[in-house]
Structure formats: C-alpha cells, structure tokens
Image (cartoon, grey):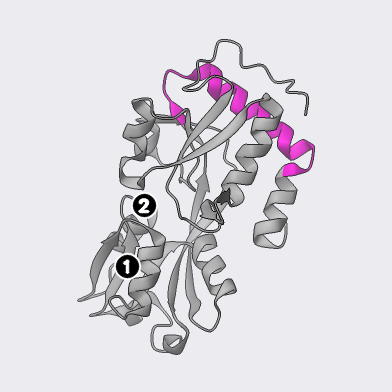
Amino acid sequence: SDGAISLEGVTLVEDGQLTVCSDMPHKPFEFEEDGETKGFDYDVVSAMGDQLDVDVEFVTTPFDSIIPALKIPYCDLIASAMTITPEREEEVDFTDPYFDADQSLLVLTENEETYATLEDLAGQTIGVQVETTGATYAEENLPEGATIKEFQTGDEMFGALIADDIQAALQDLPVNAYRATTAPDQFVVTETFPTGEQYGFAVTKENTALLAALNSALAASKEDGSYDAAYTAWFGELKD
C-alpha cells in the first residue's frame, strides 16, 4: 500500500507507529514465537498499518488491565480478540467488527465422553480467563456444584487442564479450536455455545479520528485480499 489513508489529526503514542495493547500469548490471535509476534490479530493490524503507512508494535498487556492501559495512554489501540459488549462500549469505542466468535468447552481428549457437555461438569472445576466473556458465560451457566478457577493467560489454563487442576476450559471457540487442532492427542472441543459475539479493535472515546482511520484501513484490507489471506492462514477456510 502507498499509505493512502490519512492519519491527519491523529496523535500516536510513538510517531509513525501504531502501538497495540494485546494480551499475549493468546493463540491463534497474538503470540510470540522465535522472537517474533505472530497471529491473526497481528496480521490484520499489520495489514491495516500498511494501509496507514505506519509501523505496528504489539505490547504485552494483561487482559484485566488492558482498557486502563489504553486510557493512560500506554498504546493507541487494543487488538486482543476483544468481544464488543455494552459494558466495554461505555469505556471505549470499537471499530467495525472484524471477527465472529462463540464460546466453547475444551477438555482432555481422554475425557471427551466424560465431559461431553457443560452439564457433565457438575461438581467439577472449570477454568476461565479473567475479565473475559467466557468467564461471564461460565458464571451465568455454572452447573450444579461446579466451581470456577480464573487464570491470567490461556497458556496457564491449558497447563492446569493437563495437570487436572481443572477439568475443562471455557473460552472463545477459535482459541480452543486452534489448541485442539494443533494438539488433538491432548485436547478436544466437546461443546460450543452460540452467543453472537463479535471482536473489535478498541480506541479511547476521544480518539474519533483514529477510529475513522482504522475503520477505513480495515475495509481496505478486506478489499485488497490481505484480510482473507490472514483468515485462511490461521483458520483454514474463509467465513461467509
């Protein structure tokens, strides 16, 4: 891209760079591997950065403090598989949605029949990531006698599942599905919960010029095929 979309009137944390708050690791959306940032969110924001003619730098930020970090401002935007919710919209503004997602249940492959549904986890411990819609769904649909254990990162939750510290992980379907696809001998998704959730990139309420530029860059990345290329690379087939 020749950077045709203007950032006139936008003040960035670092000149010539989009600084992005992101809760890493959170495969397949954002994570570091061999010293490089990778993932679907990273690829999409990088494509948007090309449209805006700026560099992109992801900064690891715990999810439970990611909105306060944006407001400091520690970064220009949040890209962290963040679901657009009315509660969050009271604090930040979201771009147009860029991903559709539901909730899901992940268990050890050996327990596929034992914990085939959420109700099968009565009396067991269910892992969630703090301040996520998965945590909210678990709280609102908790089976009888079950308990919730919170984790800061997905990797911590997967480790606890292997160690039998928890018996299931309840979180966004694409994250659980990616883990099950890459380690089918260990994990399996046994149930999905349609919620109509959509992800958006977040900016501060007063940053309307940046919001408009990001929406234009997102639309342009879809038009030139870079969004589709990122989606295919991480999820295997294009959404409808």
Is residue 108 found inside the magenta-colored segment of the image? Answer: no
Which residue is painted at 37% across and 37% down in the image?
A: 88
Percent x, y for residue 83?
Answer: 46, 46
Locate residue 16: give its quadrant: top right
Percent x, y for residue 140?
Answer: 29, 60
Locate residue 123: give its quadrant: bottom left
Percent x, y for residue 107?
Answer: 42, 78
Q: According to the image, label 1 marks what residue?
A: 127
* Helix, strand or loop at mark 2: loop
Q: Can you say which quadrant of the picture contains the N terminus? A: top right
Horizontal arrangement in the rendering, residue 33 relative to residue 59 (left or right): right
Q: Can you say which quadrant of the picture contains the C terminus? A: bottom right
Q: Mark 2: few, some, or many residues within 10 Å (few <14, many ≥20)?
A: some
Horizontal arrangement in the rendering, residue 83 relative to residue 53 (left or right): left
Q: According to the image, label 2 marks what residue?
A: 132
Question: Could you tell me if residue 181 is visible in this image?
Answer: yes
| Picture layout, residue 73 above or below residue 112 | above
Type of amino acid at the residue the image marks with label 2: Thr
Is residue 216 found inside the magenta-colored segment of the image? Answer: yes
Magenta residues?
203-226
Locate residue 69: give its quadrant: top left
Percent x, y for residue 86?
Answer: 38, 38
